Image (cartoon, rainbow, N blue to C red):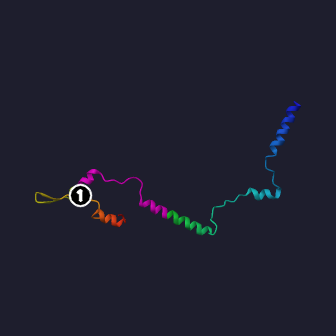
Amino acid sequence: MARFLALVALLVAAVSGFSPAPAPLGLRAASTSTQLYGYVPQGLTEAEYKKKLAEQEAKSKANKAKFPKGKSFLDVGTWLNQLEGKQSFKGENFKGSGHTFAKQKFATKEEYDAAKKRK
């Protein structure tokens, strides 16, 4: 039993070495009140930093509005109705399909090569 009490006393002494020391009475009241600090970069005031953050947030929202989530697509039925509306006839004869083509920037391969400075 005496060995057990000696072992417990030894363990309590070892563990108490890792616990923080109590603060003096005069400092306890000051340490119990907490103050929250925010991040402000060096060289800026808090108002300037908040203004900059607001500008970045507005810019980000404007950019996200340009590129909405999800893929926008045209339904086949709607596309066929649009295509049919663009078709033109001359009497019974077909005049134009209303089909759209990609714009061609260069008329020939030589023009393309000259623009890209290729041989």
Residue situated furthest right in the rendering: 2
The residue at 63%/62% (across/down) is 39
Q: Position of residue 51 (x, y in %)?
A: 56, 68
Q: Quadrant of residue 38?
A: bottom right
Q: How many numbered marks, from 0 up?
A: 1
Please state which of residues 38 and 42 is positioned toward the viewer in this rendering: 42
* Left or right: where 115 falls relative to 81: right
Prevalent SS, magenta region: helix
Q: Above or below — where is 19 with respect to 3? A: below
Residue situated furthest left in the rendering: 91
Estimate how packed mark 1 is, as few (under 14), some (14 to 19) or many (20 or more) residues with alpha carbons within 10 Å: few
Q: Quadrant of residue 88?
A: bottom left
Q: Position of residue 40 (x, y in %)?
A: 63, 64
On the rendered image, what quadrant is the N terminus found in? Answer: top right
Residue situated furthest top in the rendering: 1
The residue at 81%/54% (across/down) is 23
On the rendered image, what quadrant is the C terminus found in? Answer: bottom left
Q: Position of residue 106 (x, y in %)?
A: 30, 64
* Left or right: where 54 falls relative to 37: left
Residue 19: in magenta span = no
Q: Secondary structure at mark 1?
A: loop
Please state which of residues 72 and 101 is positioned toward the viewer in this rendering: 101
Q: Position of residue 100 (x, y in %)?
A: 26, 59
Q: Which residue is mark 1?
A: 99
Residue 72: in magenta span = yes
Please state which of residues 82 and 99 is positioned toward the viewer in this rendering: 99
Q: Above or below — where is 81 with respect to 50? A: above
Residue situated furthest front in the rendering: 119
Q: Magenta residues, as a range?
A: 59-82
The residue at 30%/64% (across/down) is 110
Residue type for callout 1: His
* Left or right: where 70 falls relative to 14: left
